[in-house]
Image (cartoon, coloured by chain):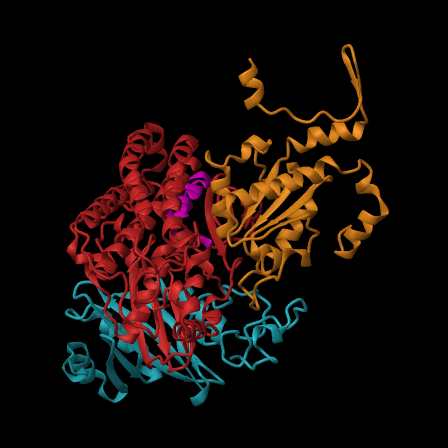
């Protein structure tokens, strides 16, 4: 059986010429655990064979066992660098299934949270790309701002990383004044740090020489591999789910979708950098234009009642129990909803048969889909270029394996 | 809109009328069940058609329906030019689910089909490298089928009664 | 001068005999003190807990002030194996191999609910706790644990390192522990 390993077919006699290098699951430069067995001709990669599944946690099977309100913590752990986007995507999927429209204020608050998550995801990717080229300073400067974002999440939902933020129908509580103060502080301090980071790397000769022309992929191949997100936009295709199928009132905001030219590592870096600036602009617009109103929709069958009532009121206690244990009536249906995650089109394909847990829940995970192209992208390059390509693709192991 | 007015469905019915088992619009996406032998031709038709241009494979997954002893394979396509999506479903018998591969049409289908094989046991004939991708290589069962339990049955530190599960397979 | 004494804390002096220009104490205590302040961790980060570890390494929570400035990704040069994140059954043999490649004395810290007991993933593909395959010294629960919790775990490891007898690794009890896991 021939294996689909991109590269030259090994002839007998080449055994002495080629070396096999295992870029194993535990490696400081692979951000996450996946393995690549490289066949190398000196420094040049001739063939590579990826193996994934080292953190397969069976999310899709787990989701068939859990009621709808209990699936949100699982979605957290998909792309854990931007967990709120996954949570919001799941809540919107369920809202689509049950046919609920959330108030405008909820939409705007969701946009603020999702753009903050997008900034934190791109922040990690770009600063770690700098670390892989040897520039540790950018990472240390920017990571401090991730702490600010964590503080904002903590103020809103109580958790730093795996947020489980929001509810089906809205938010558990309105943003407190402390949250707004922390958000203002972030919006004031972060742009300066981001400008500093850009000055360090964007026109840095060493960084540019290491990243231009490295790991390039053409737009046609990228579309054939079903790329999405910044990796696709770096090749020149401006497919952004927020623009094509606006959800959560994204069409009320004005923002640009940055697009690259060559699809190489430098373009991916620039696209993510520019997207962070656009996210900051969206958050600013959302804060300015935030409408008044309720912070959740009226869906008592799905929206957990406030804790004061749960502790004092028998009816609220019963509703709370029913919602968490999934004893509410769920309509039958087959729905697909996608959001623009940090890495691309994150889709939730949900089939409900009226039971308390989904009949089938399939996550359309962008990392899993575009990592297939990795052997093609590094073929013929040096190993140091392969490391940078992997870094710039922003492969998150949780989303890769689910 | 009514399914019959959807341009994709009208064009498909003209060409592949007898291969279409059912069609309706579910939450905005046209969902068509087709017969298994025609699936690759239908996908190629949708790909090559000058107006429809369904050239982006959003996702490919399997669904196990034990009540009818069938495994459905779902292909969800997206036309970036027209901004429209379509979902095609193929129904395969549970004991021998086989269907041709679409990797020559969409390079991204490679790992998606491997995942469907890993979880449901669907064999994609013509696939360059059909082996398990997420689970351990020597696993003998196809875990996402409904008859297999979620938990590892050999663990002894968690008692099922404490989790509301009396015995294996009692589920909810 | 007196203000400085108030703000700066000094390490505890071990009990011993002091004189002009010399300080005599038992070797164990000196070695323990030296070891505990220069632990080289191996961050075996698999998932979400790895990101909290990155935050612990960052400037805000700063693991480096505990002496762990230099992370070692090679098990041959590491003292502490920090397993952070879910270990799937596919990853188990690799974790075991990394543990076996470490030289004595070595400690293992299991960070996060998934590494301690499988966490929320009670599924067929997840190892229900790394103590199925390797001996663990300190468990840090949490999903993910806050950086303060991880630092608390490090401090507990430091206590274990400081108070360990120099002969522990050759003792029959330790060998019996390793035999239980099938490690030579």
Chain letter for cyan, please. Answer: B
Chain A palette colour: red
Compared with residue C25, is residue C119 higher up or lower down, i.e. above or below?
below
Residue span colored magenta: A376-397
Q: Is residue A17 visible?
A: no
Task: Please tell me which residue is depicted at 38% across the width and 77% down the height of the picture.
Answer: B73
Nearer the observer, B83 or B106: B83
* Residue A301 place in picture, x, y as percent: 34, 75
Residue A326 covered by magenta stretch = no
Task: Please tell me which residue is depicted at 45% across the width and 76% down the height of the picture.
Answer: B122
Q: Residue furthest front?
A: A312
Chain letter for orange, please. Answer: C
Q: Is residue C168 visible?
A: yes
Task: Please tell me which residue is depicted at 18% across the width and 49% down the height of the picture.
Answer: A255
Compared with residue A205, is residue A107 higher up or lower down, i.e. above or below?
below
- Count up the numbered dots: 0
Nearer the observer, C142 or A45: C142
* Residue B112 place in picture, x, y as percent: 40, 66
């Amino acid at each position: 059986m021939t294996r689909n390993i991109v590269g030259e077919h090994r002839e007998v006699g080449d055994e002495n010429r080629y070396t096999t290098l295992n870029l194993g699951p535990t490696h400081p430069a692979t951000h996450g655990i996946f393995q690549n067995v490289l066949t190398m001709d000196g420094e040049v990669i001739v063939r590579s064979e990826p193996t994934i599944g080292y953190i397969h946690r069976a999310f899709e099977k787990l989701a068939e066992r859990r009621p709808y309100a209990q699936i949100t913590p699982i979605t957290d752990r998909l792309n854990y660098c931007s967990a709120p986007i996954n949570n919001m995507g799941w809540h919107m999927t369920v809202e689509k299934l049950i046919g609920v429209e959330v108030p405008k204020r909820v939409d705007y608050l969701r946009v603020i949270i999702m753009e903050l998550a997008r900034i934190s995801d791109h922040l990690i990717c770009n600063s770690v790309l700098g670390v892989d080229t040897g520039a540790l300073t950018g990472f240390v400067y920017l990571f401090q701002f991730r702490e600010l974002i964590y503080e904002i999440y903590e103020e809103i939902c109580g958790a730093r990383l795996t947020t489980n933020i929001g509810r089906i129908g809205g938010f558990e509580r309105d943003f407190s004044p402390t949250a707004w103060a922390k958000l203002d502080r972030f919006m004031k301090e972060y742009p300066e740090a981001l400008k500093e980071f850009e000055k360090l790397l964007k026109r840095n000769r060493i960084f540019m020489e290491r990243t231009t022309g490295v790991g390039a992929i053409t737009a046609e191949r990228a579309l054939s591999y079903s790329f999405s997100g910044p990796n696709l936009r770096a090749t020149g295709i401006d497919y952004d789910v927020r623009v094509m199928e606006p959800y959560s009132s994204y069409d009320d905001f004005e923002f640009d979708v940055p697009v690259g030219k060559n699809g190489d590592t430098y373009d991916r870096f620039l696209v993510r950098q520019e997207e962070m600036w656009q996210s900051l602009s969206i958050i600013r617009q959302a804060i300015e234009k935030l409408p008044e109103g309720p912070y959740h929709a009226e869906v008592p069958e799905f929206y957990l009642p406030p804790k004061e009532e749960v502790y004092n009121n028998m009816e609220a206690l019963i509703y709370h129990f029913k919602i968490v244990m999934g004893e509410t009536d769920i309509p039958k249906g087959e729905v697909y909803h996608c959001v623009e995650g940090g890495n691309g089109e994150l889709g939730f394909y949900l089939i409900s048969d009226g039971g308390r847990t989904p009949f089938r829940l399939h996550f359309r995970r962008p990392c899993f889909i575009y990592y297939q192209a990795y052997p093609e992208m590094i073929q013929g390059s040096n190993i140091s270029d392969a490391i940078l390509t992997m870094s710039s693709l922003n492969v998150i192991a949780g989303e890769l394996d689910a | 809109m009514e399914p019959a007015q959807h341009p994709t469905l009208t064009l498909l019915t003209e060409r592949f009328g007898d291969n279409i088992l059912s069609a309706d619009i579910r939450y905005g996406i046209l969902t068509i069940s087709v017969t298994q032998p025609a699936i690759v031709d239908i996908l190629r038709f949708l790909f090559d058609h000058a107006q429809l241009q369904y050239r982006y494979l959003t996702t490919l997954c399997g669904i196990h329906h034990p009540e009818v002893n069938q495994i459905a394979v779902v292909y969800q396509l997206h036309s970036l030019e027209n901004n429209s999506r379509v979902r095609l479903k193929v129904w395969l018998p549970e004991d021998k689910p086989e269907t041709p591969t679409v990797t020559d049409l969409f390079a991204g289908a490679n790992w998606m089909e491997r995942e469907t094989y890993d979880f449901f046991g669907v064999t994609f004939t013509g696939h360059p490298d059909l082996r398990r991708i997420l689970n351990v290589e020597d696993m003998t069962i196809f875990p996402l089928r409904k008859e297999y339990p979620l938990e590892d049955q050999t663990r002894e530190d968690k008692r099922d009664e404490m989790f509301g599960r009396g015995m294996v397979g009692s589920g909810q | 001068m007196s203000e400085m004494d108030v703000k700066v804390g000094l390490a505890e002096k071990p009990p011993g005999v002091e004189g002009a220009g010399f300080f005599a104490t038992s070797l164990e205590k000196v070695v323990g003190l030296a070891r505990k302040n220069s632990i080289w961790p191996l961050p075996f980060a698999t998932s979400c807990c790895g990101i909290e570890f990155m935050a612990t390494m960052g400037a805000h929570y700063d693991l480096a002030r505990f002496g762990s400035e230099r992370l070692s990704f090679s098990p041959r040069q590491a003292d502490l194996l920090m397993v952070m994140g879910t270990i799937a059954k596919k990853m188990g043999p690799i974790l075991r191999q990394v543990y076996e490649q470490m030289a004595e004395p070595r400690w293992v810290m299991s960070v996060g609910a998934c590494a301690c007991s499988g966490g929320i993933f009670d599924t067929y593909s997840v190892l229900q706790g790394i103590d199925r395959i390797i001996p663990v010294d300190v468990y840090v629960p949490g999903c993910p644990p806050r950086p303060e919790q991880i630092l608390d775990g490090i401090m507990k490891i430091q206590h274990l390192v400081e108070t360990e007898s120099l002969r522990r690794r050759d003792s029959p009890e330790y060998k019996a522990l390793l035999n239980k896991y099938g490690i030579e």
